[in-house]
Amino acid sequence: MSALTTLRLQDFRSYAALELALDERPVVLFGANGAGKTNILEAISFLAPGRGMRRVPLEAPVRQDCDGGAWAVHAVLVRDDEEPFSLGTGLDPVKRTRRVRIDGQNAKAGALADLIRLVWLTPAQDRLFAGPRGARLRFFDRLCLSLHPEHGRNATRYERAMRDRQRLLDEGAADPSWLEACERQMAATGAAIMGARADTIAHLQDEINARRDSAFPQADLGLEALYEDAPAADDDQLIEALAQVFATSRARDTAAGRALCGPHRANLQVMWRAKAMPAALSSTGEQKALLIGLTLAHARAVAASKDTPAPLVLLDEACAHLDPDRRAALIDEVCAMAGQGWLTGTDRALFDAFGDRAQFFDVQNGTAKPV
Ligand SMILES: Nc1ncnc2c1ncn2[C@@H]1O[C@H](COP(=O)(O)OP(=O)(O)O)[C@@H](O)[C@H]1O
Ligand SMILES: [Mg+2]
């Protein structure tokens, strides 16, 4: 179990000061467009390392016209029978860098990941299946990261080696041993990236398959092959195969000005199982249902992993286009989750199926009143 029992915002977007007193049940935020619902979820998303669910610079959430020029979010997190944790983060008003405090002590942002996991779904992801490959891969890599914390570091190293290699190729007549060193690094980190991705797919697929009766459509997940012919039986073979791919594509990559093959070009494929149809061809509402199913499977996979705390699940406008049956099913799933769910919507009636299983807040004009 993981839940926030207090959430405090200071000079965060539309909020000068907001304090929510909560219990462990799911939280429903309802209110008109622009009322400030997503802002609250975004504030929570800063309780994890990174740039929040809107992926913005650290200065962006500072409330317009505020005096201090800095924002802060504070939360009390309860997990199972542990003592509650006090988490704080924000923009340091002087240094203009991220400030993190855990139980009153300064900490690194990375330390938050040991205490709290977050899974989120936002309307910006609605075009995930039909949209560009790169955005889909970024989305999937974030799922990998919550099961494999080393995934981010490997991705950074891979990209750095790829940039170094490209610079050597662009300059021409590079020392082959330099090129080879970059390609070795790309191959080693690339193999680790592919391993984490394959493991994540397997976990997600297990979670999806375990719910054959789910109201959300079952998806079959895959990663499109990165290059022809990769018969890798183990890690060493995979590293060799990748190094070989990079070595043989030097001329092409020089001409193209970028590396055309490799794990950075992977494509997450999602099929609607019952229809044997790519998700991208499904209707808008169907794609949303698939995406919610995937998000819930991910939340269960993270909760099931013994190394990670149960995630808080932030579902922004997830109910909006669901028919009443699916909405009720989503609400049941949220109630059954080990981590607290946070849902937003314009209309309180969308959430009637919660009954008294959730706490409701009416959001307007920089306030959120319990109802
Ligand atoms: N830095 C900021 N300072 C003050 N207000 C902001 C800031 N950023 C966004 N807003 C306001 O927040 C509101 C949007 O809030 P949001 O949470 O996205 O609404 P919704 O309830 O529809 O999810 C808008 O009215 C916007 O003008
Ligand atoms: Mg919103």
Image: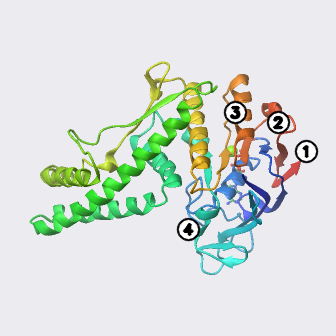
- Give the distance between the C-alpha atoms of the residues marked 4 and 2, in whole angstroms: 36 Å
Disc 3 residue type?
Leu
Q: Earlier in the sequence, mark 3 or mark 1?
A: 3
Q: Residues within 10 Å of mark 2 (few under 14, many from 20)?
A: some
Ligand 2, image quadrant it occupies: top right
Structural distance between the alpha carbons of marks 3 and 1? 22 Å
Residue 313, relative to residue 329: is it above or below? below
Quarter of the picture holding the C terminus: top right
| Residue at the image position 61 percent from the left and 43 percent from the top | 300
Give, as a three-letter code, the residue at label 2: Arg
Q: Which residue is mark 1?
A: 371
Indicate the secondary structure of the residue bearing disc 2: helix
Question: In this rendering, would 175 be left or right of 305?
Answer: left
Residue that label 2 marks: 348
Amino acid carrying label 1: it is: Val
> Of callouts 4 and 2, which one flags the residue occurring earlier in the amino acid sequence?
4
Point out which mark residue 110 bears.
4
Q: Are marks 1 and 2 in contact (CB under 8 Å)?
A: yes
